[in-house]
Image: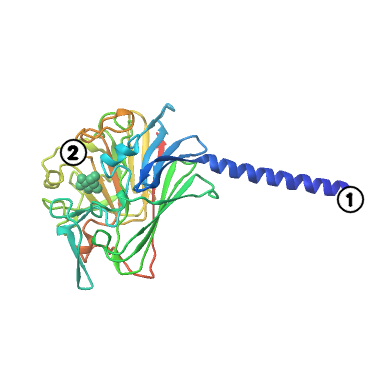
Amino acid sequence: MMKKIQLLSLIMVAVIFISCNQATKNKEMVKKDVFGTQDGKEVYLLTLTNKPGNVIRLTNYGAKIYWIEVPDKNGKKDNITFGYDTFDETLKGDKYFGSIVGRFANRIANAKFTLDGVVYNTPANDGPNTLHGGPLGWHSVLWNTEVLRDSKFPAVKFTYVSPDMEEGFPGTVNASVTYTWNDNNEIVMDYVCTTDKKTVINVTNHAYFNLHGAGNGDILDHVVTLKASAFTPVDSVMIPTGEIRKVEGTPFDFNTPHAIGERIGEKYDQLILGKGYDHNYILDNKEEVDVTVYEPVSGRMLEVITDQPGMQLYSGNFLDGTQIGHGGKVFKYRSGMCLESGHYPDSPNHSDFPTTVLNPGETLKSTTIYRFSVK
Ligand code: BGC
């Protein structure tokens, strides 16, 4: 009898020890440091380390991904995304590196849209248009930070309450994005939004990638496979004309692998208007992986998986070398590319595009994954 009790106590002690140890491990998987202050509030830099020992860094300023350190085919690790070393540089630098973009990613034509007969004016910050939710959009606000200690993998949830009429958009919106860095080297981004008034939402992540390592040359040799049969051509101010154009037979066809630089210089109307690739693809959404990017020198591969209908392929055409990021790296012309999952640009002004309207009582839920590996 005595022996049984002793055995039971021993088992209980072991269980308590294992669960305490797990909690300590979870704590170590996410390190929270102060990055700076804004309006008297602390800005954090969060370091997430997964079991294979790979590291990503996030900040709650703009809910940005600031660092993704993954191995090449020889096991050499390097950071492959754009960001800055200090908060001060962040405030002065490019607004969109790694940012969560909202309320409306990409452009809204002539900075206005109509909902139920009411015209809403949003700030024009890109010629006549509104770009990425306006100058004070979600990329520039401080999100609340919650480290998800009970998660199996390192995970951080950022939440933000966007006030009614912020940057001209109706409704108070409760937004959250949870980043999980799992042991398969996937950044899983789970978005959730609700509103108290009818509104429009298009949320994305604007990370720039260079699989050679951020600041190491350009992305023209990155080989892209993008599962989309059509895209939305734009006019001279980058607004979709409404045409849905088949990619077949054009330099926009990435259904079979092509290097970004292979056809980017062709005298094709949309490459001229976009100054390269800066277009929304209409995803086929038939296979698990929507986009694959392979860089042959390092062997690094990025796969993007999304439940969204569109994907903006942007070849860094407006990068001009004026931005100096991590460790003094210079982000030159076409030295980074973005794959922005979401809805089509200017959807609120195109009734035939998939709707971006969010009603009270509805919950917008969406997931996009960046998966890193080597080949
Ligand atoms: C747009 C580009 C824009 C860039 C700004 C991209 O999402 O498509 O036109 O210049 O964001 O960082």
Crowding near the residue tagged with mark 1, few <14, some 14–19, many ≥20 C-alpha atoms within 10 Å: few
The residue most toward the front is: 40
Using the image, determine if residue 326 lies above or below residue 154.
Answer: above
* Residue identified by numbered label 1: 1
Type of amino acid at the residue the image marks with label 1: Met
- In percent of width and height, residue 307 lies at 36, 55
Give the image quarter of residue 213: top left
- In percent of width and height, residue 312 lies at 26, 49
Using the image, determine if residue 5 lies above or below residue 257.
Answer: below
Using the image, determine if residue 201 lies above or below residue 72.
Answer: below
Tag 2's secondary structure? helix
The one nearer the camera, 34 or 56, is 34
Using the image, determine if residue 263 lies above or below residue 4.
Answer: above
Q: Upstream in the sequence, badge 1 or badge 2? A: 1
Separation (CA) of disc 1 from disc 2 = 80 Å
Q: At 66% across and 43% down in the image, what residue appears?
A: 18
Q: Is residue 345 visible?
A: yes
Instruction: Classify residue 106 as left or right of residue 303.
Output: left
* Image quarter of the C terminus: top left
Type of amino acid at the residue the image marks with label 2: Arg
